[in-house]
Image: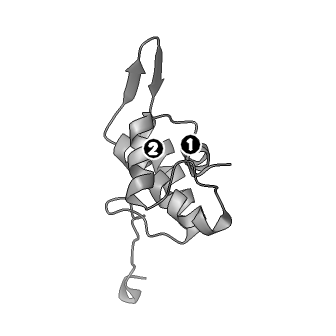
Amino acid sequence: MTNLEALIGEVEPYTVSQYAYSKRLLDAGLSESGAYSAGNKRDIARCAVSILVSLLPLTGDRTGKTSQQYSREGLEDRIQQLCEENGLDLPEGLAVPTVEIHPSII
């Protein structure tokens, strides 16, 4: 399996252009055709998170005869899953909100 195939696998079922995959891999210092290894797992996840975050403002995409709709909640869930599995921080704006209850209120 190549780094490109591993990245496509992490982004599925969403699809983006070949250029988006290539750019993220190059930015991470990885070759598309390089052999994927467990040592690349975190870098591949970081690339996938970057791609998925870029889809958040969109509601869908149409290319030729195919189209896909995006669920913001589904994208956020996948991003959170990738971050948790790979020890990555959630991108800014996606952090799970927390509520702190002061003891004097109870």
The residue nearer to you, when weighing 1 against 12, is 1
Label 1 CA crowd tier, 10 Å (few <14, some 14–19, many 20+):
some
Disc with the residue nearer the chain's start (1 vs 2): 1
In this figure, which residue is indicated by the disc labeled 1? 8
Secondary element under disc 2, as helix, strand or loop, is helix
Kind of residue sitting beneath label 2? Tyr
The residue nearer to you, when weighing 29 against 79, is 29
Q: Residue at x 41, y 70 (%)?
A: 98
Give the farthest residue toward the bottom: 104
The picture quadrant where one finds residue 17 is: top left
Kind of residue sitting beneath label 1? Ile
Examine the rendering and report whether any part of residue 85 can be seen.
Answer: no
Check the image and report above or below for 87 versus 7. below
Q: Residue at x 36, y 31 (%)?
A: 59
Percent position of residue 30, x then y: 49, 58
Check the image and report above or below for 65 versus 61. above
The quarter of the picture where the C terminus appears is: bottom left
The residue nearer to you, when weighing 95 against 48, is 48
Label 2 CA crowd tier, 10 Å (few <14, some 14–19, many 20+):
many
Q: Residue at x 41, y 51 (%)?
A: 24
Secondary element under disc 1, as helix, strand or loop, is helix
- Labelled pair 1, 2 in contact (Cβ < 8 Å): yes
| Separation (CA) of disc 1 from disc 2 | 8 Å
In this figure, which residue is indicated by the disc labeled 2? 21
* Colouring scheme, one of rainbow, by chain, secondary structure, one colour: one colour
Give the farthest residue toward the top: 65
